Image (tube, coloured by chain):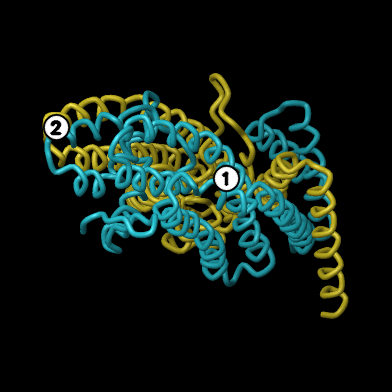
Chain colours: A yellow, B cyan
């Protein structure tokens, strides 16, 4: 069973991560696009905010590249990498289990959250048509403040969409993860540890496919060989 | 704050230009499927509309002119914003047709180029630099995030501020300037850099997994195998999210049952 303190910790983490995550999420579409929302920046920052920098780094390594080059076609909407990475940080509540187990379990639940975030982006963009129509009517009636009002409403809508999605998903998901991890034997931790190590490889493969052209593959090979040589030299020197 | 013309240059005050660039940061705030960025574009252009058309009827016509469909890459939208501001300030007659022509002619080309350059070029490249540094020296993760931000934002602010200024100065003649920049070639070069950084990051992921206290060299081999397996799975059409679950299931089973 969950104790009161643990539920309080889950709520506190859900509110904190949902607020910071929704602020960072604004950068994804609504405001700026300064790269703050990208996992390589946003998840790392969020890791520091919740006091678990390694968790933020892992979320960045795993999810920054996973959907590179994916284009929404028909009913398929690639998951939102920024929201997925934020959800991982939020869902992996520190409650007894090792970091690797929490992170992997969180990732398993965060991917559907990322998919839902993309679908909600589409929903918000279709609802924004209403803002557009009201705004243009007001504007044509000689009320110039309608422009700023419409923009503020659009920003608020994108923020609230991410905030409530993350709040709900993190609270419910973190409770499920805590309960599930309590029931697992230590052998599972070993399995999760290996998943933790190999997870970034899936994103690497996705990015490699996105850059699959002769000159890029040559550059990839040069980078990999060069780095491998440096790592080998470092390991035999130290 | 009045618009004047000197030797072919359209001048508006530095403050108005800064206001337009700041407003352009919200160009996607009302992004919608009917007219995409049109309202955000009008929001960014508003200081010029307000200045040029004080009479209600002329202002109304200008507003209607900018409510038509508009979609492009958000950073390169500033280039079009500058050109359109130039046309608005310069053209007395035919402004309706000229503004429409400029927007239609530029938004598609700059949209495709901007997506290619920023979304699949510079952003992954800057992120990969940070990822590689994080994988090798995680202690300074915050510094690496700032490195990625600096690399990326130099380019995106250049696109937003510089191209807006040039567009404002040259108007539709900006196409010559854009050709001179050879941006498509630059985008290809950026992807080569990103691929190189991806190579560095891949080696770091495998090396890091091989350093793991519990699995040792087996961890490194498992990471290398995961790259190959994921590449194969994605090549036969399995989407990356599902691919992660499959690789995770295989790795978890190996970790629990065999290794």
- Where is A193 relative to A202, above or below? below
Q: Which residue is mark 2?
A: B57
In the rendered image, residue B37, in percent from the top left (x then y), is placed at 38, 35
Please report the residue visible at 37 percent of the width from the left and 30 percent of the height from the top. B97
User: What label sits on residue B110 in the rendered view?
Assistant: none
> Residue A140's image quarter?
top left
In the rendered image, residue A122, in percent from the top left (x then y), is placed at 42, 28
Say how many tags the image has.
2
Q: Is residue B135 visible?
A: yes
Q: Are marks 2 and 1 on the same chain?
A: yes
Please report the residue visible at 45 percent of the width from the left and 48 percent of the height from the top. B79
Q: Nearer the viewer, residue A30 or A225?
A: A30
Query: Reading the chain from its start, which is encountered first: label 2 or label 1?
Result: 2
Q: Is A19 on the left-hand or right-hand side of B141?
A: left
In the rendered image, residue B89, in percent from the top left (x then y), is placed at 30, 47
In the rendered image, residue B61, in percent from the top left (x then y), is placed at 22, 31
Work out which quarter of the rendered image holds the N terminus of chain B and state it.
bottom left
Q: Which residue is mark 1?
A: B119
Specify the subunit that label 1 lies on.
B
Where disc 1 sits, the SS reads helix
User: CA gap, disc 2 to disc 1?
Assistant: 40 Å
Q: Is residue A9 visible?
A: no
Circle 2 or circle 1, nearest the eye: 2
Please report the residue visible at 81 percent of the width from the left and 69 percent of the height from the top. A231
Q: Nearer the viewer, residue A140 or B136?
A: A140
Please report the residue visible at 34 percent of the width from the left and 36 percent of the height from the top. A161
> Residue B212's image quarter?
bottom right
Residue lying farthest to the front in this orientation: B7
């Amino acid at each position: 069973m969950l104790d009161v303190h643990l539920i309080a910790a889950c709520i506190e983490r859900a509110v904190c991560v949902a607020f910071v995550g929704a602020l960072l999420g604004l950068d994804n579409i609504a405001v700026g696009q300064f790269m703050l929302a990208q996992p390589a920046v946003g998840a790392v920052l969020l890791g520091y905010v919740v006091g678990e920098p390694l968790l933020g780094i892992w979320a960045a390594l795993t999810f920054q590249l996973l959907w590179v080059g994916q284009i929404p076609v028909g009913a398929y909407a690639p998951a939102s990498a920024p929201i997925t990475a934020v959800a991982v940080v939020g869902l992996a509540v520190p409650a007894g289990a090792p970091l690797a187990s929490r992170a992997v379990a969180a990732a398993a639940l965060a991917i559907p959250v990322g998919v839902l975030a993309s679908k909600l982006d589409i929903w918000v963009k279709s609802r924004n048509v209403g803002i557009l129509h009201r705004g243009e009517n007001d504007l044509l009636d000689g009320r110039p403040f309608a422009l700023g009002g419409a923009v503020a409403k659009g920003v608020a809508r994108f923020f609230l969409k991410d905030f409530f999605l993350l709040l709900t998903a993190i609270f419910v998901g973190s409770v499920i993860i805590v309960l599930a991890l309590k029931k697992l034997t230590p052998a599972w931790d070993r399995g999760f540890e290996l998943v933790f190590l190999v997870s970034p490889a899936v994103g690497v493969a996705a990015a490699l496919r996105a850059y699959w052209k002769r000159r890029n593959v040559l550059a990839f090979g040069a980078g990999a060989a060069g780095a491998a040589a440096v790592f080998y030299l470092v390991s035999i020197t130290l | 704050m009045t618009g004047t013309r000197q030797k072919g240059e359209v001048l508006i005050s530095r403050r108005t230009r800064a206001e337009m660039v700041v407003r352009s940061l919200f160009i996607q705030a009302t992004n919608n499927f009917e007219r995409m960025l049109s309202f955000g574009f009008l929001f960014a252009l508003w200081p010029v509309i307000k200045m040029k058309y004080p009479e209600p009827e002329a202002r109304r016509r200008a507003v209607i002119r900018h409510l038509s469909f508009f979609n492009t890459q958000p950073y390169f939208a500033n280039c079009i914003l500058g050109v359109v501001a130039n046309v608005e300030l310069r053209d007395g007659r035919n402004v309706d047709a000229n503004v429409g022509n400029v927007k239609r002619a530029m938004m598609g080309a700059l949209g495709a180029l901007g997506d290619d350059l920023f979304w699949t070029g510079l952003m992954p490249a800057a992120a990969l630099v940070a990822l590689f540094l994080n994988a090798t020296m995680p202690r300074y993760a915050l510094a690496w995030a700032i490195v990625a931000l600096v690399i990326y934002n130099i380019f995106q602010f250049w696109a937003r501020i510089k191209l807006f200024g040039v567009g404002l100065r040259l108007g539709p003649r900006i196409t010559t300037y854009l050709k001179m920049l050879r941006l498509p070639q630059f985008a290809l070069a950026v992807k080569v850099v990103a691929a190189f950084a991806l190579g560095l990051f891949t080696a770091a992921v495998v090396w890091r997994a091989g350093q793991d206290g519990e699995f040792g060299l087996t961890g490194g081999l498992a990471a290398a195998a995961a790259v190959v397996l994921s590449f194969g799975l994605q090549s036969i059409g399995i989407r990356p999210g599902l691919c992660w679950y499959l690789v995770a299931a295989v790795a978890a089973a190996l970790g629990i049952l065999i290794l």
